[in-house]
Amino acid sequence: MHRMCADDARIFLQHGGFPTTAPEPDTMEFRLDVEALKAQFASCTTDNPHDPNNVLGAEVVQASAEWQNELSGQKTQRAVIMDAEEKASGHLRVAAQAMGEALGQSLIAIRLTDWQAHWLKQAPSSTMFYPTATEFAEVKTNIERARERAQGRVFVAGRAALAAQVEAARADKAKGEAYAVADAAGLPRGRGLMYGQQAVQVSRRPPPPRRRPSRRPRRRRTPPAHRRRTARR
């Protein structure tokens, strides 16, 4: 049983029912029907139109042949775009993960710096829990190590983002070449690229921003004492 689609409804409404006759080849009506079928195929509705009276065979054969030629004419560019999108997405995943790891190391450095600042403000004899010189040295080493790791991950993210931009440029170049093929054949731009038309946009997603790890967290401002008293009332 034929699966009805939106284009079948268009044909039904256009003809006041499903066609009982078809226009002759080389007529304007025939060309319009062929172009409409190619637009249907391009929308990923690949089923042949509902034709209970078996009159649309010539149009379907012509549209199918032209559609396959259109796809074949831009096959090389589609392959380049799909490959570039896959590689760009991989690079962006690496960049995103590296930035997350950089943030984690930055937070470690911040917490250790807070600990260090707290105890340096205390007098050594003010508490029995005052850290030893060895503990201070270990914390200092861990702070430097965390900062170095964070900077290293930022560097990795930057390189991955640049690699993604290279792939995006490669996809954009292939899109331009496909447009030139379409223009030369008098065809709509982008239609023969199929998903590749959207893949170019995907590959051009902006990379994550390159930010240096923050040394200190932002603290919330404490409201004045008179405001706190008013709030409690």
Image (spheres, rainbow, N blue to C red):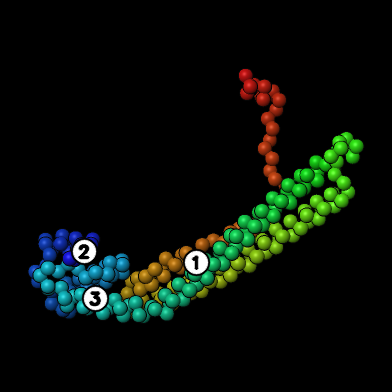
* Amino acid type for the residue under numbered disc 2: Arg
Q: Which mark is residue 63?
A: 3
Name the spot of residue 76 as percent of width and height, x first: 42, 80
Given residues 136 and 5, the one toward you in this image is 136
**Earlier along the polypeptide chain: callout 3 or callout 2?**
2
Q: Secondary structure at mark 3?
A: helix
Q: Which residue is mark 1?
A: 203
Rendered position, 21 above or below 109 = below
* Amino acid type for the residue under numbered disc 1: Ser
Rendered position, 220 above or below 116 = above
Asked if residue 27 shows in the view, the reply is no
Q: Please give the name of the residue rendered at 51% of the width and 62% of the height, measured from the top-left corner.
A: 205
Give the crowd class for mark 1: few <14, some 14-19, many >=20 residues within 10 Å.
many
Mark 1 near mark 3, Cβ–Cβ under 8 Å?
no
Image quadrant for the N terminus?
A: bottom left
Rendered position, 73 above or below 132 = below
Asked if residue 198 shows in the view, the reply is yes
Image quadrant for the C terminus?
A: top right
Q: Please give the name of the residue rendered at 35% of the width and 73% of the height, measured from the top-left corner.
A: 192
> Which label sits in the foreground, 1 or 2?
2
Q: In terms of image quadrants, where is residue 55? A: bottom left
Q: Residue furthest front?
A: 128
Q: Please give the name of the residue rendered at 19% of the width and 60% of the height, measured from the top-left corner.
A: 9
Left/right of residue 153 with respect to residue 31 in the rendered view: right
Give the crowd class for mark 2: few <14, some 14-19, many >=20 residues within 10 Å.
few
Left/right of residue 195 with respect to residue 83 in the rendered view: left
Q: Which residue is mark 2?
A: 3
Given residues 119 and 223, the one toward you in this image is 119
Q: In terms of image quadrants, where is residue 3? A: bottom left
